[in-house]
Image (tube, helix red, strand yellow):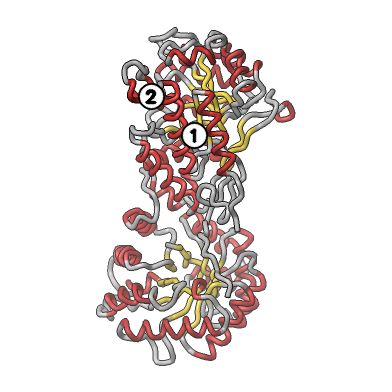
Amino acid sequence: MIIIGERINGMYNDIGKAIKGKDPKPIQEWARRQEEGGADYLDLNVGPASPNKIEAMKWLIEVTQEASDLPLCLDSTNYDAIEEGLKLCKKPAMINSVPAEMPKMERVFPMAVQYGAEVVALAMNEEGIPKDADSRIALAAELVATADSLGFSPEMLYIDPLTLPCNVAQDHGPEVMRTLREIKLISDPSPKTVIGLSNISQGTQNRDLINRTFAVMAMANGLDAGIVDANDNELMSAIATARILLNKDIYCDSFVNVFINRNR
Amino acid sequence: MAVEILKEKYRSKVGEVVLGATKEEGGTRSHTITVGGETSLPYLHFEGETPNRPVMALEVWDTAPTEWPPFFEKFYGDVWNDPGEWAKKCVNEFGADLIQLRLAGADPDINDASPEDCTVAVKKVLEAVGVPLIVIGCGKPEKDNLIYAPVAEAAAGENLLLGVAELENYKAVNSACMANKHNIIASSPIDINICKQLNILIIEMSTAMANRIIIDPTVAALGYGAEYSFSIMERARNGALQGDKMLGMPMIGNIGSEVWRTKEAITPTEDEPGWGEQEERGILWEATTAMAYLQSGIDMLVMRHPEALKIIEKQIDDLMQDNSY
């Protein structure tokens, strides 16, 4: 599974403060730590508090790239901030995210083509998050078709079927699993799938256990990528183990370390 | 309408390992040999590159072998009391790309040669030929562990390929390689998991060893489990091409020593007249075994019979022909 490290997000106090005070240290510290933890990408989100999203995103990209060579995942609903950010990225980045809404798709996919970026797309539209798998898959199909019509390859598309906290919407669990499987049938080459993992455990006790159990189940249903806490060792060990059990990696006694250090 | 040919895309490639060192590089070899570097499954030149031709070593021992079939004497009999002369003949007359010196004489049950005797043999070969050198112990770890350090030191700068490291016994040989900048043979008993784990352990001792490992997955002779070795090598190579760095190393196989202990190769003609003439039979057994492993992506073959080497040389020529389209 492709690991997108979630930690550089203005929603976290230390990052929010760092962005506000233009202090690169906490950002760079988390960039390095997530890389050491086994991240493939670093998600960058300036958070709700930044008054100037474009400038904040540009600064965040610059200071992150000073500390890490990992590709970035630009996480914003402000597409101008993303576009300005894409110009600064040293490696092809990921755009996070676009819903299945026409004007937004028309803004994001051509931009992704122009900058060679991948795209995280959400299986939702103006009406919100669907209740069942069929509606999610219909939206996923719409995302794929629109992307394709705008010259964006489905292989570069990461569809997030969207999870809700398991204590609020328990019935969504199996629907998400079915969605993960069936998204693969939409096109050939098929789109990839991604999940913002920690949403599943919002407001619950024992969040880490729920997160890692869900990660493993989703992987067994074909999940390609996760926006996760790359420094949750138990989670990363569970993902490494699932990769062995799914025959994605060849077993050796040090399989957890090998997975965590695979990019180094 | 033009047909679009589907081609496999590989995410990664096999690492390259350089063997030997010239004068400029601190050694005394006339040239170096680079192995590995493949970017596709073996010889699919239309999907990727095989930048380095597989190479063949011939075996040289530091003591005259007593159990080889008698017809080997006509090739090696005049030189097998002198590893330098023996190596020279292998290179100059039989066309070996490199020499594998087996310090068989160190075996307590053979000559119990001292570590000093071993370094003398290594130096003799280094002086006699200009090709890169593979040096392996006698196969008894407790003795071999005494040999690695002095041999590695005596050949410092020569960028040897030294072996063998095994899961239960890799530290002494790895330390000797690390200290004197040699390459290492990492040997596993037809087991992909141990193969990978051993590479990890070697690299954990020094990351500088990451591009100095040659995998010896253990090759069996035709009829003795070759298909198991083959499938392990196939899996390792697929793993390497999919990005598993801990399997992304070139591979070596001791073809000659495995083949020349099978009953098909050592049974004299008069004992089994129906099997055909022994020498021809053995040569074909060795060549056929080697051919099969070439298809698995093996990068280095250690051969014994000069005629088998000649057959495989031709086979490699054919495999290296560009078939891209």
Q: Percent x, y for residue B231? A: 38, 44
Q: Which residue is mark 2?
A: B276
The N terminus of chain A: image quadrant? bottom left
Check disc 1 and give the amino acid type.
Ile
Q: Residues within 10 Å of mark 2 (few under 14, many from 20)?
A: few
The answer, for residue B3, to whether it is visible in the render is yes
Write the residue at 62% across / 82% down. Answer: A80
Q: Is residue B287 above or below residue B5?
A: above
Which of the 4 image quarters holds residue A72? bottom right
Eye-nearest disc, 2 or 1: 2
Rendering quarter of residue A213: bottom left
Element marked by disc 1: strand
Q: Report x, y in % for residue B123.
A: 61, 15
Subunit of label 2: B
Outermost residue toward the right in this view: B24
**Dot 2 and dot 1 residues touching (CB under 8 Å):** no
Residue that appears at 34% across and 54% down:
A241
The circle drawn on residue B252 is: 1
Residue A11 in picture, x, y percent from top left: 48, 74
Q: Residue B36: image x %, image y %?
A: 56, 42
Q: Is residue A205 depicted above or below B234 in this figure?
A: below
Q: Residues within 10 Å of mark 1 (few under 14, many from 20)?
A: many
Distance in Å between CA atoms under marks 2 and 1: 30 Å
Identify the amino acid type marked 2: Gly
**Front residue of this view, candidates B257 and A222:** B257
